[in-house]
Amino acid sequence: MKALHTYTRRDCLRGAASALLAAALPRAYSREAKPGAVLLALDAPAGIDPAGYLVSEKYDGVRALWDGTRLRFRSGRLVAAPAWFLAKMPAQPLDGELWLARGRFEALSGIVRKVIPIDDEWRAVHYMVFELPGAPGTYAERAAQIVRVVDAAAWPALTAVEQRVVGDREGLEWRLDAVVRQGGEGLVLHRADAPYLTGRSDALLKLKPLDDAEALVVAHVAGRGKYEGQLGALRVRTPSGASLLIGTGFSDAERAAPPPVGSTVTYTHRGFTRTGSPRFASFLRRHEAF
């Protein structure tokens, strides 16, 4: 079994056993998450103390639910994975991310959306497991059980997401910096004492150097200068109804063939202005509804 780890800038010591950790933690999370198929993360507040959380890397993959016989996207649509891939999955229901590697979301998305799977492509796909749907116990106990399930499967493509205990805020910042420097997106903090929950809850938090959000494309703004004849910016509408322009973050190919009006895009930003507008909004990718 993989051990839990405590990280500070000065040392990287192994953590205590998950059951002992869970017994010692305060129960401060919200139990009032709205019903839903999966647990969804909230943004971590500034200066969060990681005490009481298990910390893992935030993988830039596609969320997928395994019910013991079928693999589905969050939408409920079946994932057209090869039969040999599904045959290697355990009978235990699992929740995780289909993943290729850091920075390869677009390639992964193209692979898993195909109606007819391509075996050679799927041989590079991993299923990164971080939850046991409906299972009893604390999250620390379920995380330990995930490791046992994955070890029993003895299949390299099935991976238990490594959960670590981070000793303090300084250690959390150190860990975030290490992941981002290696091309990762950020971190996920899960309350170690949380029961299985669904919907949005502060039992699960995401910590990234940049915030991200989705918005609806309502218009294309023509480019000027070197972008003459191409996209200059997207005018988008946020879920709150606010309108904003996104003019950076596009590749040449995306400026030549931008996300169509009516589609949803994901953009990054650095917090908000005093009026509530996203600061330094930059295009990240078209949002795919799996």
Image: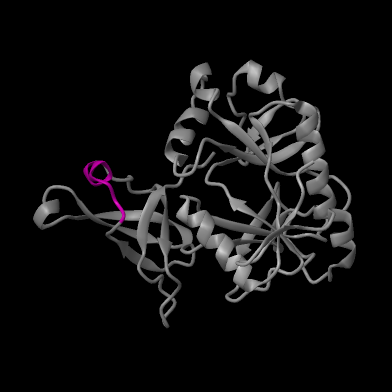
* Residue closest to the eye, 33 or 190: 190
Check the image and report above or below for 205 versus 111: below
Query: Could one spot residue 118 in this view of the protein?
Result: no
- Residue at image coords 47%, 42%: 288
User: Which corner quadrant of the image does residue 277 belong to?
Assistant: bottom left
Where residue 154 appears, x then y in whole percent? 74, 26
Magenta region's main secondary structure? Answer: helix
Q: Quadrant of the C terminus?
A: top right
**Span highlighted in magenta in the image:** 249-256
Check the image and report above or below for 186 versus 94: below
Colouring chosen for the image of the structure: one colour
Q: Residue furthest bottom?
A: 274
Q: Is residue 189 left or right of residue 181?
A: right
* Residue closest to the eye, 55 or 249: 55
Check the image and report above or below for 142 versus 178: above
- Residue at image coords 44%, 63%: 238
Where residue 38 appears, x then y in whole percent? 70, 48
Query: Could one spot residue 232 in this view of the protein?
Result: yes
Where residue 204 appears, x then y in whole percent? 69, 60
Q: Residue furthest front?
A: 10
User: Which corner quadrant of the image does residue 99 belong to?
Assistant: top right
User: Which corner quadrant of the image does residue 157 belong to?
Assistant: top right
Question: Is residue 253 covered in magenta?
Answer: yes
- Residue at image coords 14%, 52%: 227
Where residue 149 appears, x then y in whole percent? 80, 34
Q: Is residue 160 left or right of residue 75?
A: right
Question: Is residue 156 covered in magenta?
Answer: no
What is the total number of numbered labels drawn onto the structure image?
A: 0
Q: Quadrant of the N terminus?
A: top right
